[in-house]
Image (cartoon, rainbow, N blue to C red):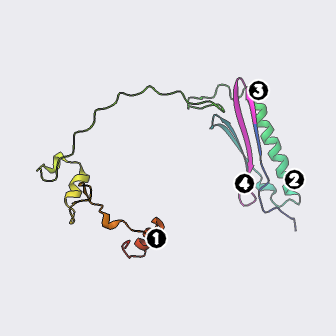
Amino acid sequence: MAKTFEKAVTGFNHNIKHKGKVFHVQTEDSGVSNPHIITHLFVGGNILATKKGSYADIVRSENLAELVREMMEEQHKEMLRNLINGVYDNVDRSAQSYQPGQLAPEAPKAPVAPLPPKPMPLTQVATAAQLPPEVVAARELAEQPRENNVGVETLFGEDLISEKSLDEVILSYLAGEGGN
């Protein structure tokens, strides 16, 4: 019986400068369970081109690892040759991309919006149509906010503070102990 490799063959990665930009070519094997060789051409982190080849027809070959390696090399070299020969020069590169070490230009700063008006005290009456849904939901809570020790209304009182770590609080909550 033919001996096959179980793991994927290690791939290739190359950076190449072409017409003032750095391109990255990456070729990888998906392994015998998914017998494909995939080569991507990247520019600025975006995939510019992809080639996918199959070796499903030779998975039973005795020297499969060597054959896959040769196929990977050829597919990788083909992508490099196509790049150098200008095959991808006219591909739409409208997606924003940056070269290694290049920072995005700063966007113009938007004018600062004025601060929103102070929230309405809970004692003031307002119609539900005037309030955001989260405020309406908060007002319908069975337990109303209390003033904490610094005079601020809150639903989160100091009675909830404990010496437990966050992990312990989460685990006790998940165990149905209510975080106590």
Q: Mainly helix, strand or loop, the magenta region?
A: strand
Mark 3 and mark 2: Cα distance apart in space: 28 Å
Mark 1 and mark 2: Cα distance apart in space: 53 Å
In the picture of the structure, the residue carrying the numbered disc 2 is 66
Of the two numbered discs 3 and 4 on the same chain, state the one appearing first in sequence: 4
Mark 3 and mark 4: Cα distance apart in space: 28 Å
Mark 2 and mark 4: Cα distance apart in space: 15 Å
- Name the one closer to the observer, 23 or 171: 171
For residue 119, side relative to residue 14 (left or right): left
Circle 4 SS class: loop
Of the two numbered discs 1 and 2 on the same chain, state the one appearing first in sequence: 2
Of the two numbered discs 3 and 2 on the same chain, state the one appearing first in sequence: 2
Q: Residue at x 71, y 37 (%)?
A: 24
Circle 1 SS class: helix
Mark 2 closeness class: few <14, some 14–19, many ≥20 residues within 10 Å: few
Q: Residue at x 27, y 60 (%)?
A: 155
In the picture of the structure, the residue carrying the numbered disc 3 is 85
Q: Is residue 154 above or below residue 92?
A: below
- For the residue marked with disc 1, what is the amino acid? Glu
In the picture of the structure, the residue carrying the numbered disc 4 is 30
For the C terminus, give its image quadrant. bottom left
Q: Is residue 75 above or below residue 68?
A: above
Q: Which segment did they paint magenta?
A: 15-36
**The furthest residue to the left:** 125
* Percent x, y of residue 87: 71, 28
Q: Residue at x 42, y 27 (%)?
A: 109
In the picture of the structure, the residue carrying the numbered disc 1 is 168
Mark 3 and mark 1: Cα distance apart in space: 61 Å
Of the two numbered discs 4 and 1 on the same chain, state the one appearing first in sequence: 4
